[in-house]
Amino acid sequence: MAKDYKTVLEYASDEFVEKRSRFIGYCKPVKTEQEAVAFINEKRSEHWNATHNVYAYSLREGNIKRYSDDGEPSGTAGMPVLDVIVKNEIYDVVVVVTRYFGGVLLGTGGLVRAYSHGSKIAVEAAKPVIMQSCLMCEARCAYNQYGKVSSLIMGIGAAIDDTVFEGDVLVKFHIKPELLGSLNKKLADATSGEVEVQESGEEYFAVPI
């Protein structure tokens, strides 16, 4: 069974100013290193005149983690950006924090705090979610059983994806694996064993945190 994991829902950005330096944090969900690098290059092109374009990314496949200080003192920029990702246990994500220098030096501690904050607000704006591994299922029932069957499916915490009304009713839904046994029992009790659940695979679904 595939494992649940945390990622972000969408591309987003946020920004703030610290001692006249402008920091813009960008965050995007990605699946591959190529996607992450393409996004980093896109932001570098967009902000070609910025002082620094610091980045970090984390991928589930191969457990890959990379970061760059992009000219900032070692350990003050890329690592703090990655730390936010790692501490929140977020995967399949890339963060770029762009800095336009405002003429006032922040010092080592100030840089760490600023890049951490840039990463944090970008991740929050991109809406962290849990990708939950669910079983794709369907149940076929008579029309007079449909109300009971659909309410049992939703009542246990599963989500109905589609309903097909033909000679009978086909209810397609996804459910957390640990709930399936209980649902099968409830359906069997409610329909005298006439309605059974058929599994057709697994898929991930985003659940807000």
Image (cartoon, rainbow, N blue to C red):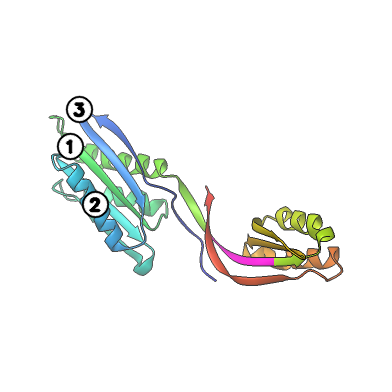
Which residue in the structure is indicated by mark 3? Answer: 20
Magenta part of the chain = 132-138
Q: Amino acid at mark 2?
A: Ile
Number of residues whose C-alpha sits closer than 10 Å to that of mark 1, classed few (under 14), some (14–19) or many (20 or more): few
Residue 118: give x, y in percent of width and height: 30, 40
For marks 2 and 3, give the one nearer the viewer: 2
Please name the residue shown 81% across and 68% down the image: 188
- Toward the front, the furthest residue is 167
Please name the residue shown 26% across and 43% down the image: 97
Secondary element at tag 1? helix
Please name the residue shown 75% across and 70% down the image: 196
Q: CA distance from mark 1 to mark 2?
A: 25 Å
Earlier in the chain: of badge 2 and badge 3, it is: 3
Q: Amino acid at mark 3?
A: Arg
Residue 3: give x, y in percent of width and height: 51, 66
Say whether residue 39 is left or right of residue 2: left
For marks 1 and 3, give the one nearer the viewer: 3
Which residue in the structure is indicated by mark 1? Answer: 107
Task: Answer whether residue 55 is magenta in the image.
Answer: no
- In the rendered structure, are the residues bearing label 1 and label 2 in contact, judged by CB atoms less than 8 Å apart? no
Q: Amino acid at mark 1?
A: Gly
Which residue in the structure is indicated by mark 2? Answer: 40
In the image, 80 versus 120, the foreground residue is: 120
